[in-house]
Image: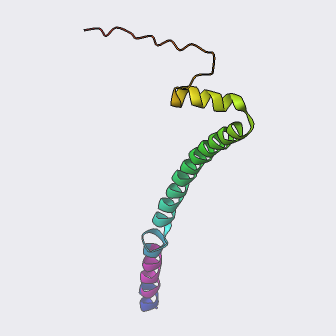
Amino acid sequence: MRWLLIFLSLLLLLLQYQLWLGEGGLAKKLTLERQVAEQQQRNEGLEQRNQILVSEVVDLKEGQESIEERARTDLGMIKEGETFYMVVEPEDK
């Protein structure tokens, strides 16, 4: 009977070790849950960025105003009949 008690105690210790520290144990589970939460946060940020890009594409496809704005700010273009004024700020020394 004593050997059975020792055997069952050792088996319990082995199972506890695998539960807490072994491959697929609770420590690994907590690590994976943390990684999943971080990835979900990254995905949310990327989804927001994608929504901004989609709305920008729709604006460029449908509206002339956004195309004009892009041409003015990015390419420095002006409309026919407009006068371009460049204001140069003096450098402080």
Residue 11: % across, % down: 45, 83
In the displayed structure image, the side of residue 91 where residue 82 appears, left or right: right
Query: Is the residue 26 above or below the residue 65 in the image?
Result: below
Which residue occupies the extreme right position in the image?
62
Compared with 41, 24 (above or below) is below
Which SS does the magenta portion mostly show? helix
34 lies above or below 29: above
Q: How far across and how far down the image is residue 30, in percent?
A: 50, 60
Snapshot quadrant of residue 17: bottom left
Q: How far from the left and from the top, in percent, is residue 28?
A: 47, 66
Q: Residue at x 66, y 31 (%)?
A: 66
List x then y, in percent, for residue 73: 54, 26
Q: Which residues are magenta?
A: 7-16
22 or 16: nearer the viewer: 22
Question: Image quadrant for the C terminus?
Answer: top left
Say left or right for 60 vs 3: right
